Image (cartoon, rainbow, N blue to C red):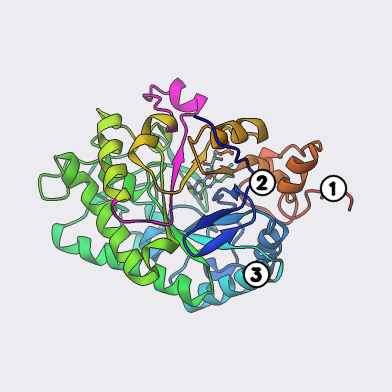
Amino acid sequence: MTNNQDLFSPIQLGDYTLPNRIVMAPMTRNRAGEGNAPTLLNATYYAQRATAGLIVTEGSQVSPQALGYPATPGIHSQAQITGWEEVTRAVHSAGGKIFLQLWHTGRISHPSLQADGALPVAPSAIAPAGKAMTYTGDQPFVTPRPLDLDEIPSVIDQFRQGAKNALEAGFDGVEIHGAFGYLIDQFLQDGTNQRSDRYGGSIENRARFLLEVTEAVCSVWGSARVGVKLSPSNTFNDIHDSDPKSTFSYAIAALKNLNLGYLHLMEPTPADIRHGGKPIPVAEFRPLYPGVLIANGGYDKQKGNVAIANGIADLISFGALFLANPDLPKRFQLDAPLNQGDRNTYYGGDEKGYTDYPFLPS
Ligand SMILES: Cc1cc2nc3c(=O)[nH]c(=O)nc-3n(C[C@H](O)[C@H](O)[C@H](O)COP(=O)(O)O)c2cc1C
């Protein structure tokens, strides 16, 4: 069944009427300032992209323990809240809407990024394959410290506090980062969760952390201004599950009952398939989720329009294309040529490859 909607049809997302369905996907750019606080350069970058129907910021760590990479912004100190206030003010002045992505990296961190050289935390003591990005270059991942049962509520509180801080910083909503092998995903998938308490074992138990975090964040924002991002087919960060279809079907059905603003779901990517992931297209999950669904991963204008017209997704988020094209909606509208992104400047650096991608002449 097709409808007559496309990327340019306005849509209601919770209380907000978005002018288009073109979402800027969350993208870590490792350009936060001192104390992991956002800067005026970050504000310029986001304001340049304010014609998106919705901007989702880069992952923002909810606590010092949640940090996993150099120079990523946080949402746990006053300086960070103040920095984000500049960002939200700039985006709102440019007419945009912006949600903050709440992030805890769990085992995808390194003692050199943690207070007092502590071990990163995770559901279970399983080291990821690969290397952590640190201030002194890439270093092998370490075996994380499994969280004690009685400290899990305090980690959920980190998300609750991050959500409160995001409210104070003037965001329009928040997205919970449940994707890409970070802490929430580490609880969800059985390749990283071998707990035998109420947070491990059965799918219901493994999904408990995701659902408790989501409920905590909704208690701050109201569910209509909360989104959750999941990546059922992803293999990045050495994440895997013995039965992702069942695991994610359960999680998605449970999230449906929370009446969120949206669910943000990733398509399988060529890299996931290369690394042995079980590719499950977003279309397979759609019947489980009648609410607002954002699809992501490898979309362009044409594929996005088809997915919306077929009802597979309600909105589409664009990562690499938005990074390189600050005026992406206008370019789509005019079928104008697209700038190509420079991968050498994706992670870290200054305005080069960040705020200097050209706009179409007006
Ligand atoms: C430079 C870069 C940084 C990213 N950082 C994040 C992030 O912080 N949080 C997140 O959920 N996804 C992150 N992603 C993934 C994107 O949100 C998106 O899922 C991915 O780029 C696929 O969409 P695309 O094919 O439109 O680029 C990042 C992607 C890129 C290119």
Please report contact status of discs 3 and 1: CB closer than 8 Å, yes or no.
no
- Most distant residue in the right direction: 361
Residue drawn at the location 55% of the way across and 37% of the way down:
308
Between the residue at mark 1 and the residue at mark 2, the CA separation in whole angstroms equals 19 Å
Q: Is residue 338 left or right of residue 102?
A: right
Residue 294 percent coordinates (x, y) = 49, 44
Q: Which mark is residue 360?
A: 1
Q: Amino acid at mark 2?
A: Phe
**SS label for mark 3:** helix
Q: Is residue 126 left or right of residue 271?
A: left
Foreground pick, 316 / 75: 316
Please report contact status of discs 1 and 2: CB closer than 8 Å, yes or no.
no
Image quadrant, ligand 1: top right
Judge whether 248 appears above or below 263 on screen.
Answer: above
Residue 79 percent coordinates (x, y) = 53, 76
Foreground pick, 67 / 231: 231
The image quadrant of residue 304 is top right
Write down the region rendered in magenta: 257-282
Q: Is residue 17 left or right of residue 47?
A: left
Where does label 2 land, which residue? 8
Q: Residues within 10 Å of mark 1 (few under 14, many from 20)?
A: some
Is 118 in the magenta?
no
**SS label for mark 1:** loop
Mark 3 or 1, nearer chain start: 3
